Structures are given as structure tokens and as C-alpha cells.
Amino acid sequence: MTNKYKQIIVANWKMKLDVDQAASLASELKEILKPVDLSDKKVVLCPSFSAITGVSKILKDSDIALGAQDSLYENSISTSDLKKLGCEYIIVGHSDRRALGDTDQIVNKKALAVLANKMIPIICVGETLEKYEAGQTKEVLARQVAQALKDFPNQYFILAYEPVWAISTSGSGKTITPTEAIAQIETLKKNIPANLDNFDIVYGGSVEPKTVASFSKEFKGSLVGGASLKAQSFFEIIKNS
Ligand code: PGA
């Protein structure tokens, strides 16, 4: 599996929509994107677990892909079931999960389980505000990347750089400049094991229709939370990517 797209735009709906709202947003996006040429852009929707089945039915026969927001590794059924439900992508290591106890080792195991089930892991890495202010961004990224990719086979994966403090729900009120985010692409690449050459790096954290183009100049796409919850703003992000 490789990536043939210039941009991958992932909607992370978190727990913001109930099953009905998720289904209607998916239908709205499917409609709005019908006339859009998506041959070089991959759009992925990651609803909450309870909405996956409904959204999967809606996205069938569309160019929009389905993803999940997390998976387990202990019981492989939970991961393979996501595949059966139509998921192609799975977010692992999101800062919300790391805050709930997902260690680098757990992130690694989850990502490996996703690969073993022939799906694409979207592995989130990023420093907290405390580490950022202490000037330790590079160290954090080095550790998170190296550990997340431990024992990886050379199979396609996505790395999402999400500075925790720049996520809209972090409460910091801060956003990162595209220049500062882009500067970390090198840090990420430097820490990817040399035998892995099949990956893309996307950016996440307060991506908006107005700002996405300056990130997508260098990043291969974006992971979008808040601005993916309305069809029009997510549509504009896709268009401007
Ligand atoms: P945000 O969320 O776009 O609302 O900052 C991004 C994320 O948490 O993945």
C-alpha cells in the first residue's frame, strides 16, 4: 500500500456528534464533494465508534474513506472488526488518548495491530505546552517517533504532527505558525528508522480554511478537529489544501 494522493485530509470528529448528527454530516459531505475532483486528494472521516456503522453505509460507493479514532491491540478482533466495518485508517496516539494513559509502547502496539490488519495507522505525535516552553520539542518528537515505529515493517503509515498546545480544545489559546510547524518535519524524518520509506507526514492543530494552505505547502495533509464539524468549513479546507 502506498499513497498516490497529494493531500490527505482527515476529519477527527472526536465525541462531538451523536449518531444522527454524524450520519447527516457524512451525507452532507458526500453530496457537497460529489462534483469535486478527488483524484489527488484523500478525504477520511473518523466518527466516534458508535457512529462508524452508520457513516460506513453512507460512504459506501463514494470516494470518501472511513477511519476510526483509536483501536485496541490486546484483542485483535476489535481491530479486525474496524476493518470489517469499512475502516481504512485508524488514528493512534492522539494526545487525548495519551492523556488517558497511552504510553509510547501502547501506541507502538496499536499501530502494529493496525498494520497487521491491513489498515493505515495515523500516528499522532506532539509536544505539550510545558515541553514546548521548556524548548524540548525535538527531544519529545524524537522519542515519540522512534518508539511508535519500533519493529515496524516497511508498510505505509501516516505520521501526524500535532503540537498538543496548538489543538483547539487544549485551552492554551495558542496556535503554531506554519513556519514553526514545518521546521519540525526534519525532526520527524530524522527519527524515522532508515528502513522505513513509505510514509507521509500531515499536520494537525487548529487547522482552518484560511490557514490550511500554508501548512499543506510542506505537509502532506491535515488532521482536522473543530473545523471538520461543519460541512462548509471542512469542504473549504479540502478545497484549499
Ligand atoms: P483541532 O483538533 O483541529 O480542533 O485543533 C485537531 C485534533 O485534535 O486532532
Image: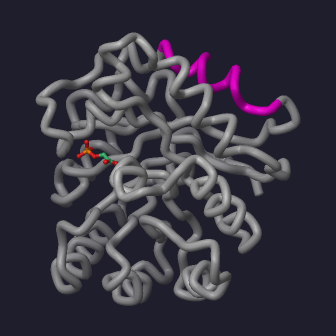
Instruction: Quadrant for residue 11, please give it.
Output: bottom left
Q: Is residue 152 left or right of residue 37?
A: right
Q: Residue at x 39, y 65 (%)?
A: 45
**Can you say which quadrant of the picture contains the C terminus?**
top left
Q: Residue at x 60, y 18 (%)?
A: 187
Q: Position of residue 162 (x, y in %)?
A: 40, 36
Residue 207 in view of the camera: no
Q: Position of residue 101 (x, y in %)?
A: 43, 57
Q: Residue at x 84, y 29 (%)?
A: 194
Residue 109 in view of the camera: yes
Q: Residue at x 20, y 50 (%)?
A: 226
Magenta stretch: includes residue 34:
no
Point out the stretch of residues depicted in magenta: 183-193
**Can you say which quadrant of the picture contains the N terminus?**
bottom right
Q: For the stretch drawn in magenta, what is the main secondary structure?
A: helix
Q: Position of residue 115 (x, y in %)?
A: 72, 63
